Amino acid sequence: MQIQVLYFAVFRERLGRDTEALEVPDGARVADAVAVLAARHPIVGQLRGHFRVAVNQAMVDDTHVLVAGDELVLIPPVAGGNDRVHVAILDAALSLDRCVAAVVTPETGGVCTFTGLVRRHSRGVTVERLEYEAYAGMAEKVIRALVDEIEAEVPGARLAIEHRVGALAIGDAAVVIAAAAPHRAEAFTACRAAIDRLKDRAPIWKKEFGDDGAVWVGLGP
């Protein structure tokens, strides 16, 4: 049977492609597909243990059974929900005002915001620019899911998040978050949880260009 494999970030760059068809036996598991890929592409074997696998935009383990037509993605280390939630992956300038407008209601007593900017120095090197890449469809689903999760945990909290992709210069905004709640403590808690969980879960990758060369943050050159 045939499945489709998508590549992002370091895999796309090193393989020189963003997709390929893969033939695997009927009843094959994720581990079997990865083994076939590793035999075909040495980089996959070299990075085994440094990436996760998603099938049809959901994280799975090695025992997951594949079916014909599945979409399998190798997810390198990374640096959503209801219709009301404002979540966006954009290749244009972000808008904190847009996020704030999406969360404020007559019940809002406090709004906490976070803006992540591209800084000049990181890891002891001088940064020239960043490039962000995302598995956009899955990233939005993951972010919407964590928004739902946090809003369920923090009484009265409402969240909106935008994340940038593409080339960013020093001082550009990479992510903006607005968290509203009836009281300031809950707004602070929701905002902090949002950025921490986004950085841990969302399939969004950052390539850093600096005076020591270029590196995918979280993995290495």
Image (tube, rainbow, N blue to C red):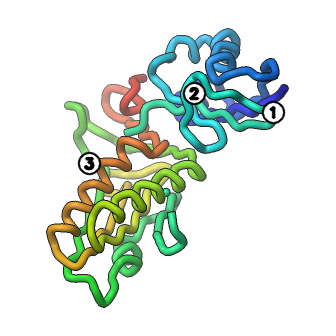
Give the image quarter of residue 104: bottom left
Q: Nearer the viewer, residue 175 or 210?
A: 175
Describe the element under mark 2 as helix, strand or loop.
Answer: helix
Please state which of the two labelled residues, at mark 3 or mark 1, is closer to the viewer: 1
Nearest to N terminus: mark 1 or mark 2: 2
Describe the element under mark 1 as helix, strand or loop.
Answer: loop
Please name the amino acid that badge 3 sits on: Arg
Q: Please give the residue where the numbered disc 1 appears in the rendered image.
A: 68
How crowded is the residue under tag 1: few (<14 C-alpha within 10 Å), some, or many (20+)? some
Q: Please give the residue where the numbered disc 2 appears in the rendered image.
A: 11
Please name the amino acid that badge 1 sits on: Ala
Q: Nearer the viewer, residue 129 or 26?
A: 26
Nearest to N terminus: mark 2 or mark 3: 2
Rendered location of residue 28, percent (x, y): 73, 21
Describe the element under mark 3 as helix, strand or loop.
Answer: loop
State the mark number for residue 119.
3
As drawn, is 30 to the left or to the right of 193? right
Nearest to N terminus: mark 3 or mark 1: 1
Q: Farthest left residue? A: 185
- The residue shown at (34%, 85%) is 105
Quarter of the picture containing the C terminus is top left
How crowded is the residue under tag 2: few (<14 C-alpha within 10 Å), some, or many (20+)? some
Cβ atoms at labels 2 and 3 below 8 Å apart: no
Rendered location of residue 56, percent (x, y): 66, 42
Please state which of the two labelled residues, at mark 1 or mark 2, is closer to the viewer: 1
Q: Farthest bottom residue? A: 106
Measured in 3D between alpha carbons, the distance from the residue under mark 1 to the one under mark 2, in whole angstroms, is: 23 Å
Rendered location of residue 77, percent (x, y): 43, 32
Q: Nearer the viewer, residue 4 or 27?
A: 27
